[in-house]
Amino acid sequence: MKSQQKVLLIFPRGEAIRNFIYSGCVEELRKNAYVVIISVIPNVEIETLLRQNCDELYELKETHIPYFIGYLWDFLDIAHGKWLWSKAAEWRWKLRDIEAKTFSKKIKRIAKKIFVFPFANRLGVEFLASIESFCCQKISPDKYYLSLLKKIKPDLVFNGSHIHGLIARPIIHAAKALGIKTATFLFSWDNLTSQGRIFPYYNYYLVWNDNIKEELLRIYGKIKRETVFVSGTPQFDFHFQKDNIWSKDKYLNFVGAEEGRPIIMYSTGMARPTPGEDLIVRRIGDICKTIESRPQLIVRVYPKDLTGRFDTLKKERKDILFPKIDWEINYLTPMPEDIALYTNMLLYCEAGINVASTVSLELCMFDKPVINIGYNPIGMDVKPVNYASYYQWDHYKPLTDSGAISIAWSEEEMKGLITQAIKHPELKSEMRQKLIKDFFGDLLDGKSYIRIAEALIDITSKLS
């Protein structure tokens, strides 16, 4: 008999749909709760899937945000970044300075920095956060979502992606204004130090691992330890589910690769932090031609990179394989068909190359050699970007220090590392396994979706 606990799930972006719908998390949750979903709706196919996985569905809509609220959000984010001053925050600060190219933009940028300077400390940031909450909940609450929440009457509101929460922020504030408890999932391992402040405060948090829990508690002093649940992340569950594993023949046929030749997987990054990456890929393709074993370079273009910067390379270099990445452009949504492809790309490569990406962790899960790029594209001025600097960023430095990954500081080193990875894949295997064990403990079991569902039920049970 299903309980009367009512959980409202918010999916503000396509990846949240992947994490909680495709993984089976919501299906698991519905065994013990009445589930309402408010979500972006990328297309008809996904809308059908959403409806099949809930008791009620509403579309997540952008609502009017008063100008003064928008300024508050901007100021709070800037003050938080300046106070935190992680390597990523420092980089972002410098980038914003450079992007202010016109006289008027320079003046606005200077004015913002002067305004937030007194608040760039823990007390100042907390003060701005309290002002933001007061304004959003008392002075200018969102009337649409206040009305909708009064209609739904959930016991708990869960935001499936805190960092993509701009569109969801009015719902969370409306819930807090009505006294409804809120929870969120920290979307990625780098978000605390590289993606701005979490606001408003939630009542409960679900995180990837113990390290992220400790970092969350360190940065946000008001959060209580008992309100943070370590669950793992459903985005890795797919790698450990047998239904996603293809035969090697099926994979080779799908991507157009040749039997008997080693495969090197290159995963591209976001366009802004990796300018000129298409030049790097081109030259790695040239390097592969000079290696005796004739490795095949297969490139997974970052699905959220809509710049088209690899289009010319796709046309000119038929020796470099670019499998189709099946994502819906609306709300940057992975389609179910892409889940298995990505798992098999990791499984059947001899080694993986990327620029300080989460993919490094995933390659280590499959015990594959990891090569990171520490040099800028040859012959291109990409200042203020410096590829080498990413390996000192707060979230990534533990990987750099672990010894589990190799960094090519030049093209010459890249050739040697690719050759080594093909001939001796066992090198650094113990370090890779230790890194994954230290990072995830026992959470890489394909069951994070179950732990999340159980945590949400546990929370709602305590509220009733």
Image: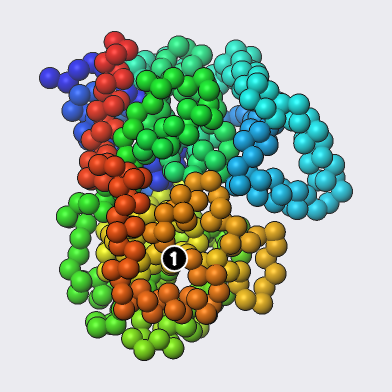
The correct choice, above or below, for 125 with respect to 236 in the image is above
Give the structural element (helix, strand or loop) at label 1: strand
User: Most extreme residue toward the left, as rendered?
Assistant: 1
Residue at left 55%, top 50%? 393
- Could you say which quadrant of the image residue 459 lies in? top left
- Could you say which quadrant of the image residue 16 lies in? top left
- Residue matched to label 1: 406
Residue at left 33%, top 77%? 422
Q: Position of residue 337 (x, y in %)?
A: 29, 58
- Could you say which quadrant of the image residue 204 lies in? top left
As drawn, is 102 to the left or to the right of 202?
A: right
Crowd tier of the residue under label 1, counting other residues whose Cα lies within 10 Å: few below 14, some 14–19, many 20 or above: many
User: Most extreme residue toward the right, as rendered?
Assistant: 103
Question: In the rendered view of the protein, which quadrant contains the N terminus?
Answer: top left
User: What colour scheme has been applied to the protein in the rendered image?
Assistant: rainbow
Q: How many marks?
A: 1
Q: Position of residue 44 (x, y in %)?
A: 35, 47
Q: Position of residue 135 (x, y in %)?
A: 63, 17
| Residue 262 visible at all | yes
Question: In the rendered view of the protein, which quadrant contains the C terminus?
Answer: top left
Q: Position of residue 379 (x, y in %)?
A: 66, 77
Residue at left 26%, top 16%? 461
The correct choice, above or below, for 399 with respect to 75 in the image is below
Residue at left 35%, top 66%? 369
The correct choice, above or below, for 160 with respect to 417 in the image is above
As drawn, is 367 to the left or to the right of 68?
A: left
Q: What's the residue type where badge 1 is placed?
A: Ser
| Residue 61 visible at all | no
